[in-house]
Amino acid sequence: MVQERSRSVKALFTVQRRAPADYLYDSGAFLYDSSTYNAAGNTLQTYQYRIGGRYFPAAPVQMANGVGGTTTNGGAEAFMELQKALNIVGDYRLSSNANTLKWAIPASVTNVLPEGDYVYGVIGWETNGAPILSAQEFATAGAGAVGGSAAAGNAGSGCFTMAIDLETSNGIEISGLNAEEQSDIALIANYARAQAASNVLEVYTYYDAMIILREVNKITNVEQCIRTYSINVFSLICDI
């Protein structure tokens, strides 16, 4: 459940992170799937937001290679939903660091999550969509010997979000969804396997806020434009 009651909610962004953060891992990594590696595959199958009596989008965003599947499809639909939420669909003036080595990446064959920040390099892929990693921070100097290395891998930390665009017009005016009139907002996420209990889902809401400019240029009633909510992963709807 998302406790948001703003008058004009423009978009929602949900990410999965470690909580609490661990200095051994990149705290800025947004995990796609935190379940333990399985030969049959690990994936987020679908996600959808229920706001009042309506669903956004109308059909669940498909993340698996088939309905109820266990292999990721690369997250193409989710990436398009993110572009719509950011209003950058077809805008090739912008560059992005999100690529196939970071977006919608499950645990590797050796059960390593994508939070190493270029410590590892992807050298191949399993048929179930899991990456095959090679550690780049060490260079083998001989049998049983390990030496230091300045080499970096090509696999950055994971980036993934369950985004939804709630704009009702071109966005120039107050144009978001009126959450004040909705009974509740809920995220429905179906995973192929149970997620790590130590992780949380954080929901960021992007909404219109009013600024009142008074005499002598004094500004009042300024609201913070980003609100964060943490949801324990146990509250997810998991299809195990």
Image (tube, rainbow, N blue to C red):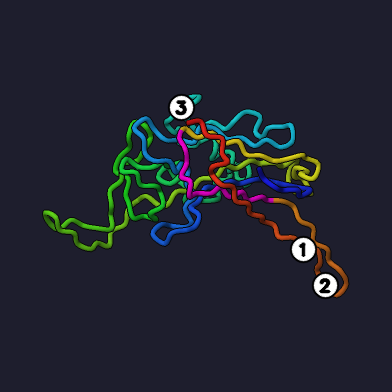
Q: Quadrant of residue 81?
A: top right
Q: Residue furthest right?
A: 215
Q: CA distance from mark 3 to mark 2?
A: 57 Å
Q: Earlier in the sequence, mark 2 or mark 1?
A: 2
Marker disc for residue 69: 3
Task: Provide the residue designation for mark 1.
Answer: 222
Of the pair 51 and 57, the residue shown nearer to us? 51
Q: Whole-percent x and y of residue 199?
A: 50, 49
Which amino acid, mark 1? Val
Q: Quadrant of residue 34?
A: top left
Q: Nearer the viewer, mark 3 or mark 1?
A: 3
The local secondary structure at tag 1 comes to loop
Task: Provide the residue designation for mark 2.
Answer: 217
Region rendered in magenta? 193-206
The local secondary structure at tag 2 comes to helix
Q: Is residue 199 magenta?
A: yes
Q: Whole-percent x and y of residue 188?
A: 60, 36
Q: Are marks 3 and 2 in contact (CB under 8 Å)?
A: no
